Amino acid sequence: MKTNRIYMQTKQLLAMLMSIVLLMSFSGAIMAGDFANLSKKKQTTLGLYMTSSQAYDYTMKNMDKTLFLDVRTPSELNYLGVASVMDANVPTDFMDSSAWDSKKRRYRRQHNDSFVADVDARLKAKGLNKDDTVILMCRSGKRSAKAVNVLAKAGYTKVYTVVDGYEGDKVKKGENKGRRMKNGWKNSGLPWTYSMDKDFMYITK
């Protein structure tokens, strides 16, 4: 009887483990499918992606081995706040008040020619190298995707883009159409603040 009981318990345990493995595989397939269906503007040459929630969880568990950068313009951070766990702001570009984009009805952006050098400096300051994990986040995941490609060309091998960004995507239907209320760091209830640390900000001299 005792042998039969042990056998049954072992069988139940194996069944439970198999269920967990299958569930993890299924979840991974869903995640892979989600990222496979990303818009081309959010895809990168490295093919490494995280949602804002995944980026937060990963950073909290690997803070000393991860460089988490916000690549939005300094003005965006100033008025919209920042993720509490970011390492620094290294903008891919700046708002150019001398140039107007008539099609998009906003100021044009001017590329930050020092972007790679600025990231290199932040990486070095944290004691990391180009094979360590770097996570980039912008407003919605498009600029960060472009930034990943730039860093990949510069020799970085493990750069992730936060696909839903800080503000998330625009709602396409209903009374909130056009507003960034779908997914994203802020909409996911992740920690952020308006109070910024000068040492983490992008300040030109």
Image (tube, rainbow, N blue to C red):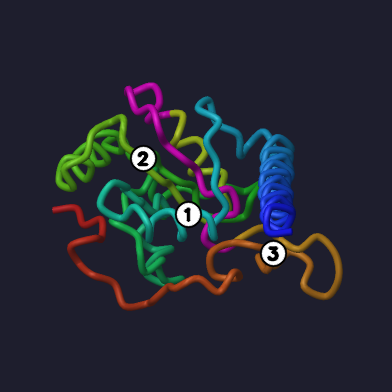
Q: Was residue 165 drawn as part of the magenta stretch in this picture?
A: yes
Q: Which mark is residue 55?
A: 1
> Which comes before the other along the chain, label 2 or label 3?
2
Q: Which residue is mark 3?
A: 182
Q: Position of residue 120 (x, y in %)?
A: 23, 36
Which residue sits at x=43%, y=54%? 58
Element at label 3:
strand
Q: Is residue 50 left or right of residue 125?
A: right
Q: Which residue is mark 2?
A: 133
**200 w.r.t. 138: above or below:** below
Q: Please, what is the three-letter code of the amino acid marked with disc 3? A: Lys
> Which comes before the other along the chain, label 3 or label 1?
1
Q: Residues within 10 Å of mark 3 (few under 14, many from 20)?
A: some
C-alpha gap between disc 2 and disc 1: 11 Å
Q: Please, what is the three-letter code of the amino acid marked with disc 1? A: Ala
Marks 3/1 in contact by CB < 8 Å: the verdict is: no
Foreground residue among 135 and 92:
135
Q: Was residue 152 drawn as part of the magenta stretch in this picture?
A: yes
Which residue sits at x=53%, y=64%? 185
Foreground residue among 142 and 108:
142
Which residue sits at x=46%, y=51%? 137
Q: Quadrant of the N terminus?
A: bottom right
Which residue sits at x=61%, y=39%? 42
